[in-house]
Image: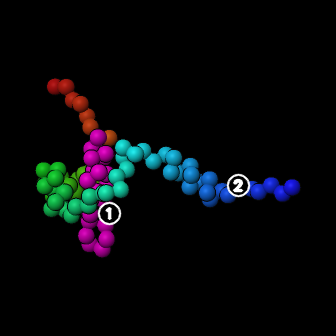
Amino acid sequence: MKTTQPNPIAAALEAETSVIDPKRYNPNRKWQNTPQIMDYLQISEATLARFKGMGLPYSKIGMTCRYNTDAIDIWLEEHYMNKVV
């Protein structure tokens, strides 16, 4: 009787999909351009540039940057600091 070897690609895909956190994944992602994300965050262009240098997620196609609001919200939560003065 011949035994079949498990498909390593299928196993990898199954493992990969099992780590997707449904709270962090939204199939209806909302993408915004630079002026829209500056308005969304209520920040200046200089602050946006500084945040991008700190790892703010964005996609760049040619000279155009697009920002996913869900990814931005997650990034902000990860960088939240509760300072007591």
Q: Say which of 74 and 49 sits in front.
A: 74
Residue visible at 56% across and 49% down? 15
Look at discs 1 and 2 and give the one toward the viewer: 2
Whichever of callouts 1 and 2 sits on the residue coming sooner in the sequence is: 2
Range of residues picked out in magenta: 57-77
| Labelled disc at residue 45 | none
Name the amino acid type tagged 1: Ser
Where is residue 29 drawn, in percent x and y?
30, 57
Residue 39 in the image: state x and y as whole percent: 13, 55
Secondary structure of the residue carrying numbered label 1: strand
Residue at the image point whose x is 49% and y is 46% from the top = 19
| Rendered position, 76 above or below 68 | above
Residue at 19% x, 57% y is 37
Q: Is residue 52 magenta?
A: no
Left or right of 8? Residue 27 is left
Residue identified by numbered label 2: 6
